[in-house]
Structure formats: C-alpha cells, structure tokens
C-alpha cells in the first residue's frame, strides 16, 4: 500500500507562514486491494459478532450488545492503526529568478564609446569612454530597479579573470507571476538600507587583457540552473587571450543558459595613427654611433603623410624635453608599418630619455592619441662596464657571451677559463690564469658571470673576498648552474659540515638552495624534450627580463622559445630571494628554480639554473644578446649607478606596465656606516602629474637582510613616477624613477566586434543589443524563472500516542472484567 493524501486539511496563512499540512492514509491503490481490505474487514467483523452472539446466548440482550461493542471497538481501533493515519507538514519556499551581468573592465574600455570627431577625440578628453557609458546605464537609468521587480540581479566584472559578485541586488517586491509567489522570507526587508555601489570604481578599466571565453565559462559554471533567466555580457567584443569563445557558446547551449550580449564602442573603422614599435639600444659607448628606428602604422590614413618628432631630456634635467629632429613619411596602406630612422652619435655620458611623437601632417580626429607617443631611454657610458667571465669549461653560453661582450664597446671583458692552458686564444681584453686574489684586482670589476666553475680550485681566501665585493662594493654576481661543478656548492655535499665549509660565504650568495644530490628522477632523468620557461608573476613584470620594450610582445617572444631540456635541481629559495621563473617539467614534484635574485648588502646576485640559455638564439640572436646585456646591467647597476655614500635606492624594474605593483628596494646605513636599524623609513612618491602620494609611503625593514628596506606602490597612471628617500639624520636624498607604459594588446583592435557578440548569443535564447537599447529592451528579454516549491519537513503518525495504547488496554480490560463477572470463559 502507498500513502493516500486526503485533501488539505489546513493551510495556515500561506503568504505569511508558507506552511501546509495534509493528512495521509496507507490505503490500497488498486480495486483488488480495496476488495481484499473491505471483504477481509467485513468477514472479521461478522465472525466476531457471530462468536459473541454464540457465547452470550444465555445473557440478556443488553450484555450481549455491551460485550460485542467492546470487541468491535478494539477491532475498529486496530483497523485504524493498520491504515496508518498521518499528518504531513510542508514548508512553502521560493527560488527567485536570477540575472547575472558580466561587465568588461579591460583597458579597451577606456577608449571612447563613439567614433572620434573633430569635436570629440580622445586626446581632447571630450566624449564619454566606454566605461563611462556603462556607468551611466547602471548609475542613472532605472535598469536595475526594473529587473529587480522579477529577478535577483548579480554584478560581475571580467578582464584577465572573472571577479565578483560585487553586489547581489535582491527582489524589490514579490513577483506576481502565477505559481511563483515568494514567501515572506524571500521578500527583501526594508530595515537595513543598502550602501550604494561605487559604479565608477566597479567598471573602471584595469585589465591588461580580455579573457572573454574563460571568464564567461566560469560564470556559467557558477550560476547555471533552472532559475537563471540569463547572463548579460556588456563588452566591446574584444577577446585577445584565453580559450576561444566558441567553446563557451557551446557550453551555454548545453546548459540552456540564455546569453544576451550588449555591445559598446564604435562599429565604424576608426581613424588612428600609432607608433607600433621603437628599436633602440639600451646602452652605448660615448662617441659610438647608433640608430633609433621608429615604426608607425595607421588605420584610415592610407596615402597620407605623417610627421615623426624626436625629443630628448637628460637624466636629472627639469622641464619639457627639447626638440632634436623631425622627419616625415607616407603611409602606403592601412595596417602596414612605415619606418623612420634617427641616427645619433652621443658625445656626453649619461642617460637620455627620448620622446618620440607621431602626428598626421594634416590634422584628423584620431580615435586614440595615447599610442602616438613612446619614450625609450638610452644610457651613454664614458667608462665601459668591467666584466669577468669565470668558467669551469668552454660551455656554449660562455662562448656566446664572451664574443658578445668583447665586440660590444660598452663592455671590457676579462676571461678565466679553468680548462684553458697558457697560450689559449680567447676573445677578451685580458686572459686570466688565476682568480683575482687581491682586493685591488677583484674590486675593479663591476660584474662577474660564473659559468659552473670549480670553486674549490681557487684560493680559499678568495671566497670571503668575493662576498665582500658583492656586499660592500655593490658588485653584481651571475651564477650559472651546470652539470659538473655546481653540486659542490650544495649544502652538505660530499659529507662536508656546513659550519666548517670554506664555501659557506659563497653559498650565502646563492638566492636558491641547491640540492645536495643527483637523482635520476630529478636531474639525470630522460632529457629528450624541451620544457618552456614558466615565469612567475614577478618574472613577468621584471623589466630586465623583457626582450622588447613592450611587455606584451616580450611575453610573445618568450612563448616562442621552446625552453630547456633540464635544469639543476633546487630545494627552495632564500627568504629574501625573488623568484622569476621555474622549470616547467611536470615530472618534477617541486619544479626547480630557473631564475632568481637577491640583494646581498649593497650588491646583487642572480641565479640561472640551466646552461642552455644559448638555445634562445633559435628564436633570435638579438633576443639572446638583449637578455644578457640587460641582465648584466641589472646586476651591475649598484656599481655603475652608485647612490649616495650611505645608501642606494632602486625600483625592481625601471619600466613597468600600467596596473602593476612596483617593489622598491633601499640599502641604508646610519651615520657610523653600519646597517640602519629602524622599523620603517618614509619615501616620497610623485605620480606622472607631479602630485605626491598621500599618505606618505613607507619602506619596511627586511628582517632577513640588515640595512635592507622594501616597499611598493601600484602604478595606476601612465608616465614617469619619481621616488625620493631622505636619509635619517642626514641632508642626503636618494632618487629613482619608474616609467609606466600602457600595454598595446587592448589597443590593437579598437572597433566593436559585433560579429563575435552576435555569434555568442546565437541559439542560446538571447540576442545582441547595442548599448543605447539595453535599458528599453533588456527587461523584456529576461523571463521570470522564479519557482515555488515545497520542502517536506516531517510526517507525524496520528495513532502513535499514549492515549491510544491506554484506550486499547482499557477496552480489553473492561471486556475481560465484564466476562469475569458474568462467569464467561
């Protein structure tokens, strides 16, 4: 038998309590079952009546009726228990219909919402941006309130990832659709007013790339369900990273998720001129001619003449850059680069910050004038950088770097090849036979590159001298790991006690912890496949590791590099180290560190965990040369750009991308030239407009490095930030600069991609809308998907009560007593 529900017995204030009680009986559900139940009951009752009439034939009719009634009452009670009467209590609940907004916050949203005209060009700061237009829709139109009449509204944003929900707006009033009446608990309360959402900050453009496919797929995963009315995507349709949106569209169709795309930005091909690339050396020797090559390209400017100006400002000079030269070039086709070359011959040492500006010869309304300017820098050295190459053997990187530096006029290179013999020919200024043994000899170098040397073969007193050169004389040390000798530096190698180990000062210079053993699973394992370099977020933002002036194109160059076959195993990194890259072999449980650095006193050491960097030449010889030159300049800057006597100040990178967090490092000494020992030191920070940051930023003491202080700031504006630190108890001030550039990835295609947005909404039940029609048409495209349902709470059996037992016992007891008194069997 199955439960049979009787009509509801009670509905108590459903609008207020949302509780429903119904009564159920375990009755037969078939005709045969009913015949058996009724027939069996009648037979039992008839048999009981016949039996009692037979037993009481000598009694009066009154006693006959009394005894029969008692037994029939017991049977009737048992029959009621058999059909199991129960009360089922249910709670009425309501799932509101939901709408999710996904708003594009990539940097492309900083472009104007409409095509530029002579009155509204980006450069004149007239006309709303795409982000401004979106903010207007949400902050000043009734769109949210209209949708809240039937839906719960969630706000998400996306660029390189999905963020949110930033706010969930509940239903403002109960929905009145049939069958979707929410309970009182679902209705919003008025007791606690909501704080207004800061729409300007929520939709502020900030992302360096647009991962539309990935972000939307994640939003579908989080929100898909029967009550989701739809997802509204507000974007210009730019998707320049991550998975293809086609797979996301297929997922939306599979999960029956309605997608409504709202497009913002001009649909016309904008007129725009841009400096696509600037090729210039980072450093040159004085009186050494060089060229600054400028590549310009345009859209809608085919056949027009473009003027390219070169301006310059020396380091430390104030005011506007000075005009140097102007050249003109004609753009032959849209999107095709035209080259302009500025030859230069430096006669003064120092750093020059160039400004290159491109403008159409005949003024036009450009869509984006921010990409008309680039600011490369060139450093002129009157003294070449002194470099010592120290190699355990003629490994390939040693040979390529030796040839590079020997032919570069801004370097003087000496070499010490431990496997060499007297009379060996090496391209160098000086060929050494022994490691520099005196302070005068060693301290003459600005940088030392150690290519897997045999450290135990040099004089024992040279190791502490090397440490002093780095820590006290701002030396720059590059440590390249190899297969032969690096293992001897590992802690505990060959059973040597680290406390008494003569290599202990050298080990302190390594920013990583080297493994003390070779393992087939970690180092000597099969090395038949190249594995790409896995850059950390810190490595992606490190300017000296960028192969081009543009971070985006540099990242693309690194992706072209297939990588290394193996790397030396490491067991972690030092507390003060900065890890830039790891070996990406998935077979390693703890991927070895490939690139890391640390400050050691006033100097710096850099670790390269593989001797296969020469493979970068397969991508480009120029990329290989640029990597080593920038790396040497980075570690040697403590010598070539010494600060004041009691300290030095530098940023992690002199050139960063808009939106990055910039780390600032300072080496500070007190009046007695001992490491400064105060918890914090204030530093003044000025944005590109010259406005100081408030409150004043602080450099905090690094507990792992005495005298070292670390701070950071977020680069939120393009241009040059200036940093200043006043030394405690001194009039000396230290200065540094950080140049913030805008990545070009979000500027490559600035027209709204209507086709992509339309295809994304196709077959999902939604459609594409232009932004100006969103307020009027969106509410009608989002049906109410709210649903009412009942939650079973409990099933209460009515007969399972104490009084029922007492009743049955009482009836049987009265029957027994009566039969006893009447002397019946």
Image (cartoon, rainbow, N blue to C red):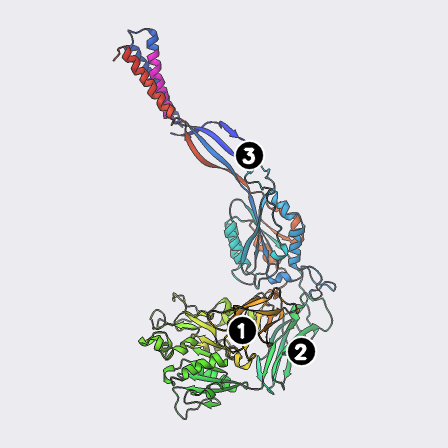
On the image, the x and y values in percent for residue 822 come to 28, 10
Q: Which residue is mark 3?
A: 16
Q: Is residue 28 left or right of residue 244?
A: left
Residue sitting nearer the eye, 174 or 214: 174
Sequence-earlier tag: 2 or 3? 3
Left or right: residue 516 compared with residue 711: left
Q: Disc 1 vs disc 2: which is toward the camera?
A: 1
Name the residue at the bottom extreme. Answer: 423
Residue 389 visible within the image:
yes
Q: Is residue 43 above or below residue 732?
A: above
**Residue 39 shows in this picture:** no
Magenta residue span: 66-83
Residue at 52% x, 34% y is: 18
Q: Residues within 10 Å of mark 2 (few under 14, many from 20)?
A: many
- Which of pointers 3 and 1 indicates the residue nearer the eye? 1
Residue 25 horizontal/vertical position (percent): 41, 27
Q: Is residue 77 magenta?
A: yes
**Residue 396 position (above or below residue 50):** below
- Label annotation for residue 666: 1
Quarter of the figure with residue 711: bottom right
- Marks 2 and 3 sit apart, C-alpha to C-alpha, by 76 Å
Mark number, residue 310: 2
Circle 3: element type: loop
Give the camera-side residue of 2 and 490: 490
Q: Residue at x 61, y 57 (%)?
A: 201
Task: Give the camera-side residue of 348 and 469.
Answer: 469
Residue 724 vs residue 517: left or right? right
Q: Quadrant of the N terminus?
A: top left
Gap in angstroms between the C-alphas marked 3 and 1: 66 Å
Give the dominant element type of the magenta stretch: helix, strand or loop.
helix
- Cα separation between marks 1 and 2: 34 Å
Residue 725: x %, y % from top left: 58, 72
């Amino acid at each position: 038998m199955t439960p049979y529900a009787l009509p509801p017995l009670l509905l108590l204030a459903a609008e207020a309590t949302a509780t429903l009680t119904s009564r159920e009986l375990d009755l037969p559900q078939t005709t045969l079952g009913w015949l058996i139940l009724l027939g069996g009951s009648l037979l039992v009752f008839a048999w009981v009546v016949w039996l009692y009439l037979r037993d009481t034939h000598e009694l009066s009719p009154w006693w006959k009726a009394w005894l029969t009634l008692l037994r029939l009452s017991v049977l009737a009670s048992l029959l009621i228990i058999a059909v199991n009467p129960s009360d089922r209590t249910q709670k009425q609940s309501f799932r509101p219909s939901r709408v999710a907004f996904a708003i594009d916050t990539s940097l492309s949203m900083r472009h104007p919402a409409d095509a530029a005209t002579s009155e509204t060009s980006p450069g004149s700061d007239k006309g709303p941006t795409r982000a401004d237009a979106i903010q207007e829709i949400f902050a000043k139109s009734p769109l949210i309130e209209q949708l809240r009449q039937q839906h719960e509204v969630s706000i998400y944003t996306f660029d390189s990832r999905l963020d949110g929900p930033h706010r969930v707006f509940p239903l403002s009033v109960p929905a009145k659709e049939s069958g979707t009446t929410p309970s009182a608990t679902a209705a919003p309360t008025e007791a606690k007013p909501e704080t207004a959402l800061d729409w300007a900050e929520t939709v502020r453009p900030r992302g360096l790339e647009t991962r539309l496919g990935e972000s939307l797929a994640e939003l579908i995963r989080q929100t898909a369900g029967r009550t989701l009315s739809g997802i509204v995507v507000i974007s210009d349709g730019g998707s320049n990273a991550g998975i293809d949106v086609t797979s996301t569209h297929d997922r939306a169709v599979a999960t029956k998720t309605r997608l409504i795309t709202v497009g913002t930005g001009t649909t016309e091909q904008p007129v725009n001129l841009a400096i696509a690339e600037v090729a210039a050396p980072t450093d040159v020797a004085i009186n050494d001619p060089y060229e600054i090559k400028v590549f310009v390209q345009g859209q809608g400017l085919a056949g027009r003449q473009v003027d390219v100006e070169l301006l310059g400002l020396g380091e430390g000079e104030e005011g506007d850059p000075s005009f140097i030269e102007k050249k003109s070039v004609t753009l032959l086709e849209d999107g095709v680069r035209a080259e302009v070359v500025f030859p230069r011959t430096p006669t003064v040492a120092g750093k020059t910050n160039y400004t290159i500006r491109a403008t159409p010869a005949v003024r036009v309304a450009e869509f984006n004038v921010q990409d008309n300017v680039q600011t490369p820098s060139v450093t002129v050295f009157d003294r070449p950088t002194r470099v010592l190459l120290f190699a355990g053997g003629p490994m390939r990187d040693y040979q390529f770097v030796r040839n590079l530096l020997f032919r570069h006029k801004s370097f003087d290179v000496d070499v010490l090849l431990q496997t060499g013999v007297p009379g060996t020919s090496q391209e160098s200024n000086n060929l050494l036979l022994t490691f520099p043994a005196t302070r005068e000899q060693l301290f003459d170098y600005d940088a030392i590159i150690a290519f897997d040397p045999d450290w135990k073969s040099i004089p024992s007193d040279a190791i502490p001298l090397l440490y002093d050169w780095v820590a006290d004389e701002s030396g720059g040390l590059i440590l390249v790991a190899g297969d032969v000798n690096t293992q001897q530096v590992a802690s505990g190698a060959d059973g040597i006690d680290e406390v008494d180990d003569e290599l202990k000062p050298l080990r302190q210079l390594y920013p990583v912890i080297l493994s003390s053993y070779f393992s087939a699973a970690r180092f000597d394992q099969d090395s038949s496949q190249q594995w790409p370099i896995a850059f950390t977020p810190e490595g992606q933002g490190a300017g000296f590791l960028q192969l081009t002036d543009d971070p985006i194109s540099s990242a693309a160059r690194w992706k072209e590099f297939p990588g290394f076959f193996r790397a030396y195993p490491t067991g972690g990194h030092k507390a003060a180290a900065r890890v830039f890259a790891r070996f990406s072999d998935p077979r390693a449980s703890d991927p070895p560190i490939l690139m890391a650095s640390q400050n050691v006193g006033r100097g710096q050491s850099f670790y390269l965990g593989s001797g296969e960097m020469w493979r970068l030449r397969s991508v480009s010889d120029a990329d290989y040369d640029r990597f080593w030159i920038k790396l040497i300049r980075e570690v040697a800057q403590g010598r070539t750009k010494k600060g004041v006597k009691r300290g030095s100040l530098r940023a992690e990178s002199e050139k960063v991308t808009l939106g990055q967090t910039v780390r600032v490092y300072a080496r500070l000494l007190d009046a007695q030239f001992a490491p400064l020992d105060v918890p914090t030191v204030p530093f003044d920070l000025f944005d590109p407009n010259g406005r100081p940051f408030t409150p004043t930023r602080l450099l905090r003491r690094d507990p792992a490095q005495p005298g070292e202080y670390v701070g950071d700031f977020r680069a939120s504006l393009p241009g040059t930030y200036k940093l200043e630190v006043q030394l405690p108890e001194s009039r000396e001030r230290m200065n540094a600069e950080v140049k913030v550039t805008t990545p070009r990835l979000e500027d490559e295609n600035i027209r709204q991609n209507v086709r992509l947005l339309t295809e994304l909404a196709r077959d999902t039940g939604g459609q594409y809308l232009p932004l100006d029609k969103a307020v009027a048409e969106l509410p009608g495209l989002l049906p109410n998907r709210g649903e009412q349902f009942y939650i079973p709470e409990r099933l209460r059996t009515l007969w399972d009560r104490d009084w029922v037992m007492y009743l049955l016992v009482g009836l049987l007891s009265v029957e027994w007593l009566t039969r006893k008194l009447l002397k019946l069997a």
